């Protein structure tokens, strides 16, 4: 998907560019729409909080005060 965006944003006026842009947009939609549906905040946030809770519960009591970091793409 990351290779598709520069192809769409290319501003040249060649005929091949104009013929390929619909293909690139279709590729972007094919990969982007399912990603946005299955990883929206209402779905991903409960998964992450459940994971952090399970990790915290399975820790050794001596390690309960250690920080737990979570990194994501939102």
Image (spheres, helix red, strand yellow):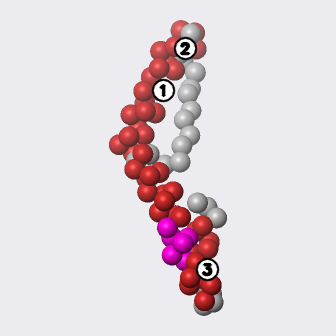
Identify the disc placed on residue 27: none
Residue 74 percent coordinates (x, y): 48, 49
Mark 2 lies on a secondary structure that is loop
Would residue 60 be seen by someone viewing this image from the given angle?
Answer: yes
Question: Which residue extends farthest left?
Answer: 42
The percent coordinates of residue 58 (x first, y second) are 52, 13
Is residue 9 placed above or below 35 in the rendered structure?
below
Element carrying mark 3: loop
Query: Which disc number belongs to residue 52?
Result: 1
Point out residue 39 in the picture as x, y percentages from the top left corner.
44, 45
Residue beneath the point at 55% across and 14% down: 59
Q: Nearer the viewer, mark 3 or mark 1?
A: 3
Give me the residue at 42% from left, 45% from top.
38
State the residue position of label 2.
59
Q: Earlier in the sequence, mark 2 or mark 3?
A: 3
Task: Determine whether 54 is above or below 35 in the image.
Answer: above
Q: Is residue 37 magenta?
A: no
Residue stretch rendered in magenta on the structure: 21-26
Distance from the alpha carbon under mark 2 to that under mark 1: 11 Å
Residue at 47% across / 51% down in the picture?
35
Q: Which residue is mark 3?
A: 10
Residue placed most toward the observer, 45 or 22: 22
């Amino acid at each position: 998907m990351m290779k598709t965006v520069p192809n769409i944003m290319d501003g040249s006026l060649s005929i091949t560019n104009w013929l390929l842009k619909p293909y690139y947009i279709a590729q972007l939609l094919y990969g982007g729409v399912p990603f946005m549906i299955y990883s929206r905040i209402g779905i991903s946030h409960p998964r992450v909080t459940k994971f952090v809770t399970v990790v915290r519960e399975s820790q050794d009591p001596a390690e309960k005060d250690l920080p737990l970091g979570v990194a994501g793409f939102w």
